[in-house]
Amino acid sequence: MSKGWRILGRDLRTRVGEVDLLALDGETLVVVEVKTRSGEAFGRPEEAVDGRRLARLRRAAQALALARGLSERPLRIDVVAVRAMRDGRLECEHFPGVGE
């Protein structure tokens, strides 16, 4: 994902959860949850990020922000849905500001 963001970390773990990607989009701290599915038997990838998962992501993001001195910045949670197609291609879709 190349959007001019500054990547702060990947696959970060905290006591309250893990974060796939942590970045700065200008002044905004962005937590990106990446969900992959090879079919839709269990729903679309973005549907896996429900209210419970969003709450966990928000707590993990706040812990990371505090630890890195970034707790005063606005926080946004994005989802990147990856679909593995039968022909081997990957289709990606970005959902900014999920749960706002």
Image (cartoon, grey):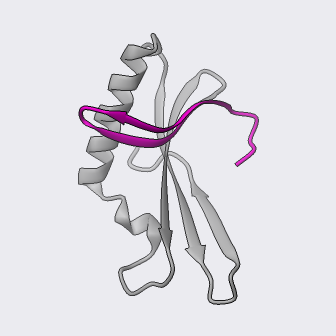
Q: Which residue is located at x 35 percent, y 26 percent? A: 62
Instruction: Find residue 75 and report its horizontal and vertical position in percent.
Output: 46, 29
Front residue of this view, candidates 63 and 12: 12
Q: Is residue 59 left or right of residue 24?
A: left
Instruction: Find residue 58 and report its horizontal and vertical position in percent.
Output: 33, 36
Q: Is residue 68 above or below residue 33?
A: above
Q: Is residue 94 left or right of residue 37?
A: right
Instruction: Find residue 56 and report its horizontal and vertical position in percent.
Output: 27, 42
Identify the main secondary structure in magenta: strand
Q: Which residue is located at x 29 percent, y 52 percent? A: 53
Question: Which residue of the protein is positioned furthest toward the top in this rendering?
Answer: 69
Q: Is residue 10 above or below residue 96?
A: above
**Quadrant hosting residue 68:** top left
Q: Is residue 6 magenta?
A: yes
Q: Is residue 38 left or right of residue 2?
A: left
Magenta stretch?
Answer: 1-23
Instruction: Find residue 73 and report its horizontal and vertical position in percent.
Output: 49, 18
Quarter occupied by the C terminus: top left
Q: Which residue is located at x 24 percent, y 35 percent? A: 16
Q: Is residue 36 above or below residue 53?
A: below
